[in-house]
Amino acid sequence: MKQAAIIGGTGYGALELIRLLQNHPYVNVTKLISRSEEGVEVQDRYPHIRAVFKETFSGLSKEELTDIDIVFIAAPAGVANSLLPQLDDGTKQFIDLSGDLRIDEPGVYEKWYGLDAPQETIQKEAVYGLTEWKKDSVRSGRIISNPGCFATAALLGLLPLLPDYAEENGIIIDGKTGVSGAGRKQSLMTHFSETNENVTAYKTGAHQHTPEIEQYLTEAGNNPVTTMFQTHLIPMTRGIMNTMYVNVKKKTDFQALYETYYADSSFVRIQPAGVMPVTKQVLGSNFCDIGLSFDERTGRLLIVSVIDNLGKGASGQAVQNMNVMNGWEETEALWSVPQYP
Amino acid sequence: MKQAAIIGGTGYGALELIRLLQNHPYVNVTKLISRSEEGVEVQDRYPHIRAVFKETFSGLSKEELTDIDIVFIAAPAGVANSLLPQLDDGTKQFIDLSGDLRIDEPGVYEKWYGLDAPQETIQKEAVYGLTEWKKDSVRSGRIISNPGCFATAALLGLLPLLPDYAEENGIIIDGKTGVSGAGRKQSLMTHFSETNENVTAYKTGAHQHTPEIEQYLTEAGNNPVTTMFQTHLIPMTRGIMNTMYVNVKKKTDFQALYETYYADSSFVRIQPAGVMPVTKQVLGSNFCDIGLSFDERTGRLLIVSVIDNLGKGASGQAVQNMNVMNGWEETEALWSVPQYP
Amino acid sequence: MKQAAIIGGTGYGALELIRLLQNHPYVNVTKLISRSEEGVEVQDRYPHIRAVFKETFSGLSKEELTDIDIVFIAAPAGVANSLLPQLDDGTKQFIDLSGDLRIDEPGVYEKWYGLDAPQETIQKEAVYGLTEWKKDSVRSGRIISNPGCFATAALLGLLPLLPDYAEENGIIIDGKTGVSGAGRKQSLMTHFSETNENVTAYKTGAHQHTPEIEQYLTEAGNNPVTTMFQTHLIPMTRGIMNTMYVNVKKKTDFQALYETYYADSSFVRIQPAGVMPVTKQVLGSNFCDIGLSFDERTGRLLIVSVIDNLGKGASGQAVQNMNVMNGWEETEALWSVPQYP
Amino acid sequence: MKQAAIIGGTGYGALELIRLLQNHPYVNVTKLISRSEEGVEVQDRYPHIRAVFKETFSGLSKEELTDIDIVFIAAPAGVANSLLPQLDDGTKQFIDLSGDLRIDEPGVYEKWYGLDAPQETIQKEAVYGLTEWKKDSVRSGRIISNPGCFATAALLGLLPLLPDYAEENGIIIDGKTGVSGAGRKQSLMTHFSETNENVTAYKTGAHQHTPEIEQYLTEAGNNPVTTMFQTHLIPMTRGIMNTMYVNVKKKTDFQALYETYYADSSFVRIQPAGVMPVTKQVLGSNFCDIGLSFDERTGRLLIVSVIDNLGKGASGQAVQNMNVMNGWEETEALWSVPQYP
C-alpha cells in the first residue's frame, strides 16, 4: 500500500482526491496538509466526509512527508513553484494540479499567470499529464504537471485534427464552466446571488489556459497554432463544456477519425454521429465525452467536449496519471457510472 | 417632488429601492450614499442600472443630507443606531430597514443582535412599519422601523389568529429564504458551490427575528407569545416562505377570518381555500400571499405565507410606508404584476 | 385608450405582455384568448396575477376581436399563419411574436420550420420589427413580425459591422439561453432534473433562427452572409447571451462605431470598452447590452450581447413596436431598472 | 455471482441502482426491464452510462426472470401490486421501492394511494426495509418493502424518541425535497421554469408517506401516533431535509440517546451537538445525517435529518437491504464519500 499526501487540503481538488482515493486498492491518503487548519479534524470542517475519512489536517514540512510516496499538490498557481524545490527529495512522485509546470516558456508563464516562472530543471522534468496523449511519458514520469480543466476538454477535442485537418489559426473555443472551477475562495463571481440566474463571459483575452492549449496544439501540429478562447461562468456547480468551431483544411470522415484515435482510451467516449454530449452525463466521473458535426453550410467542424472539471479536469485525471505512473490499471478507482441525475 | 437619499448604497436593499422609486411620481432619489464608493459612478459598479440611474455615490455627512426630505437606511444592524443621533435634525423622514429600532427592550436587542441597544428616545419614537397592521401610526410617524423579512411574512400570516384562535405557545414557524437575504457580503453561506443543490438549516435557536415576531404577536394577543422559529437557506436568489403550524384554541372559518381581516389590504392576497402560494408568484413585487388549511387529523392550522424578501420583506414595504407617511396612494410605484416565470 | 387582445394566452409571452402593459398609459389588455381555457379566470391559472388582472380567458373568433385595436399573437409557429387570413379585417394592428412572417422565401421557411409557408400577401405586408433597425417601417406598419430572441441579440450585435467590417462567411454565434425560451410546454429538455446542473448544445445545424439571422444580415450587408450558429440550454429561467466571433475585413475603432450606431437607441447600451455584459443586468427589461473586444492575437472581434428572452427577445420588443406604430414614446411602459439580483 | 433484474428501467431509481451495483462484488445487473423500451440499448437512452453498462432493455415476463436471483421493482405505486402475484415463484428475492407493500391496513392504502390494496399474503410477507430498525427481519426476509424517501428521513430521526420522549400527537414534520423525487415524468411541477427560483408547498394534508410514518411510529411507540407532515419542493435535483419539531414528554440527554441508539449503524451519522446537517453532505451516498437541538424556550426538540432521496431514500437503501438479506457486508458497494461540492 502506497502512502499519499495532499497539499492544499481545504480546496475542492483535495476533497475530490479523497473521494476518489477512498476505495483505491493500492493507495492510502494519510496526510491532508493545510497550514491554516493544522490539527483540526477534517470531518469537522467537511461534514460530508464524517466516519469515512478520520484524519486531522497536517502542517507542511519536509518531515511530514517522510513516509509519503505520492504527493498531490492541489493548490493555487505559484504554490508548487515555491514548494517543489524544498520538498522534492528526488524519489517521491509529485502530481501538481496547478498551472505552474505546464508552460515551457518562462516569459509566457509570467505574462499569463502574473507570477515568477518555475525553476527550469523542475519544469523540464515535469511531464504534461494529458494521459490519453502522453501515456508513455507519464508511465516513466516522476513529476506530473496535471492539465487545466478547460485545456483537457479542448485538447482531447482537438488533437485528432492536428496536423492534418484543422487550420492553425481557425480554431475558436467557447468554454462554459460551473462555479466550482473557481474554487472555494469567496468573491463576487462565486456569490450565489450574483451568479445564479446569470451567464458571465469572463477573462476575455486573458484566460491562462490559452497558452497551455496553444503550446500543446502547436506541439501536436508541428506548426504554430493560435486559438480564440472565451470562457463563460454558468449557474451550476460542476461541469465544463467546450464548444469548438474549426475551419478544416480538408474533409474526412471525422467520426471515424475520432473513434479510431480514441479506440484504446477508456475515458474518452465518442458520441454517435451528430449527437452532442451534455455536461450532466459525465458528472462525478473521469469521462470526457465528445460529439462531432460537420457543418456543410459553412465548411466548419463543430466539436463539443464535456468533462467534470473536478474529475477529468482535475482530480480524476490526477488519479489516472498516478495509476499509469505506478503500473496499475488506468481505471483503478475511476471506473464508475456518473451520477445521474 | 421630494428628494430621497439612501444610506448603504452598495447593498441589495438600496438597489431595490432605486428600482422601485425610479418611476415614483413624487420622489427622486438624488443621493446614494456609500463611504467606500464615494465619487464612483453607480452604473460602473452596477451595470444593470446604466442609462437609467446616472448619479455617483455620495459620502456620508449631515451636509450631504441638507436638501433631503426622506432618508432610507439600508445598512447592516448597528449602523442606524450610530448614525441617527448624528443625522436626525427633527424634520426629515427616516425609514430604517435594519433591525435596530424594532425591539423595545434594550436587553433583548443586545442579546439577539450582540450590539449596543439604540438610544431610547429614538427607539421610542420609531413606528414599527408593518403597514397593514400599523397604518395609522405610520401615517403620523416620522421615523419608521421597517420590519424584518421573515417577521413580515410571519406576522401577516399570524396576526388574524390573535388573541382568539392561536395558542400562545403553540406556534411553529419553518422559514425558507433565498440567498439574497444574506446580502452581498461574501461568506461560505453565500458561496454558489456551497449553497447550490443544498438546503441549510441555520441560526438554530438564534435568529434575530425571533424576538421581533414574539414582541409583536404578544402585543397583538395581549398575552406573552413564544414561537419556535427555524430558518432554512434555499438555492434561489429571492423569496421567503414561512410554513406555520398553529395549535388552535378554538375553531372558526379561518378562510373567512383572513379574508375579512385583509379586506382593505391591497398587498395581502388570501389564496382560495386550501390552495398554498408559491414564492415565485410574488417575485419582484410587494405582495404577501397567504394560504390556509385546517388539518382535522391533528387539530392544527397550517398557514403558508410568501413574500419577496427584497420587496414586501424590505424595500417594497419601505416604499409603502413612505407612501402612507406622505399621504400618497399606498400602492404608488408598487402596483405591478410579479415577474413570472 | 386603445384595446388590446392577446392570442396564446397561456404562454410565457402572453404573461409578460400583461405584466408590461399593466401600467401602460394608452393601452388596456381586455382580451386574453385561449381556446383551451375559455371561461376560466386568469388568476386561477396564474396566481401571480391575482388582484391585478381580473379578466377571464376568452375564446377565439372574429367577433371577440370586434372592439380590439391591437392584437398580439403569442403562439407557437404556424398559428399566426392560419389565423391571420381569418382575423385580419385590414384595420387592426397585428404583432406576431412567432417566426411565421420573418422569412421571405417560402421554401426557406418550410425547410427550417417544417410547416406550410404563410400567405404571400400577408408576409409581404409584414414589417420585421427589429425596432432599432427598422423604426421607420415599423412606424408606418400595421402587421409586425416580431424578431426571434436569438436573432434580436445576434442582429443588434452584428449590424454595425455590415457591410464594411465583417467577413460574410466569418461569423460564428454561440448562443446560450435560459429555459423559459422553450415555453411552458413539458418535455425532457424543460424537465428540472434533466436541465439543472447541466449545459446542453441543442438543434445543431438546425436552429430556425439561423435563416432569420442570415436573411437580415444579408440585407444589411448587400451580400450573402452565412453564419455558424449553435445554441445551448443553460440552467436558468430567463436570459440570452450570444457570444459572437467575427473575422474582420478591416479594423476600425469598433467601440466608437457601435456607440455612434446606437447613439439614439434608448434600449441598446454599449458597455465600456472591454467590459462584457452579463445576462442578469437586463433581467425583466427591454435592454440589449453589448460588449466588444478586439482580439489582436487572432484578428477577430468578440461581441457579447445579452437580452431577456421574454423582454427585448419577445414581449418587450412587441410593446416597443406597438409604441412606435402608434406614435407614442418608444419607452412607454418599458423604461425600468432591471430586477437585480 | 448473483444475477439481478430491475423492473422500471427508465426511471431514476433504476439508474441509481445500476450506478451503485456497477462495482458490487457479488451481484451483476443483467436485466433492465422496460416494456416501452424493449430492445433499445440502454446507453442510447442514457448516455451517461455509455461504455460502462452495455445491456439492452428487456421486456417483462416470467421467463425473462428465469435465471434471476434478485428483482428490484423501481416503478410507480400499483405496479408491484399487479406484478408480484404473477412473477413470484417463491424463491427469488424481491425488493419493491414503491409504497405498495408498506401499509398494513388495506383501507388506509386505498385512501392515501387511490389504488387497490395489495394481495394480503404478499403484504403480510413483506418486510419493511428500514434497515437500521428492522435488520433482523430483513436478514431473514425474501420480499422487502423499501421505505419511502421522506419516511426514511422521518423515522430515522424520530425512532429514538419513542415510546419514552415524544408526545404522540406532538410531532410536526416539515419536509423539503429536490425535484428528482418526482421522477422523470413530465408535469408543471417538474418544469424548470416553474420550479427554479421557487419553493412550493404541495400535497397539503395528503402526502402518501403520512400513513407510513404514523404506522411505524405507532409500532415503535406502542401507542397511536399522529403527525402533521407538510412537504415542499425545492429548486435542486437531489436531497431531502426533514425539519422536525417535537413536544417532549420528558427531557433527557438527547445527544447521548441518539448516539447510543445508532452506535452500530454505519450509515447514520449523528452530528456534533447543536450542529445541523445540510443535504449536500450526503449527496450521492447512503448516509442519513441527523442534528439535534433542544429549545429551552419552548420545550421542544428540533431534529434535522438529511438523506439523498435516491440514495438512502430509495436505491441506496434497497442495496443495503439486499446486502443484509444475503449475508454480505451491509456497506458493500455503498461505502463512499459523498460527492462534494
Image (cartoon, coloured by chain):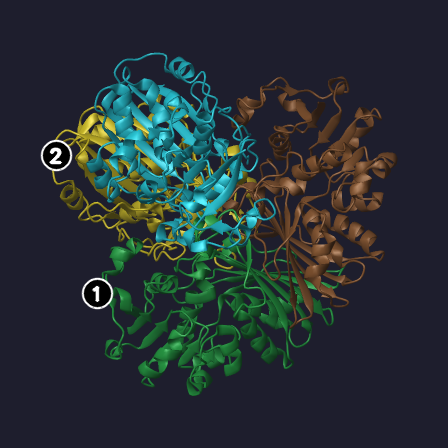
Chain colours: A cyan, B green, C yellow, D brown
The residue tagged 2 is C251
Circles 1 and 2 on the same subunit: no
Residue extending farthest to the bottom is B121
Residue extending farthest to the right is D121
Q: Judge whether residue B209 can be spotted in this image.
A: yes
Q: Which mark is residue B39?
A: 1
CB-based contact (under 8 Å), mark 1 and mark 2: no
- The quarter holding residue C138 reads top left
Position of residue D165 relative to residue C133, above or below, is below
- Provide residue C1's location: percent of width, then percent of height: 36, 55
Badge 2: residue crowd in 10 Å (few <14, some 14–19, many ≥20) = few
Q: Left or right: B34 with respect to A92?
A: left
Rendered residue at 56%/74% (across/down)? B211
Badge 1: residue crowd in 10 Å (few <14, some 14–19, many ≥20) = some
Chain assignment, label 1: B
- Provide residue C178's location: percent of width, then percent of height: 42, 41
- Provide residue B148's location: percent of width, then percent of height: 49, 69
From the image, state whether disc 1 or disc 2 is nearer to you: 1
Chain assignment, label 2: C
Quadrant for the N terminus of chain D in the image: top right
Q: Secondary structure at mark 2?
A: loop
Rendered residue at 70%/62% (across/down)? D254
Rendered residue at 37%/77% (across/down)? B94
**Dot 2 amino acid type:** Lys
Q: Which mark is residue D257?
A: none
- Provide residue A293's location: percent of width, then percent of height: 38, 20
**Dot 1 amino acid type:** Gly
Give A267 or B79, whichever is nearer the viewer. A267
Q: Secondary structure at mark 1?
A: loop
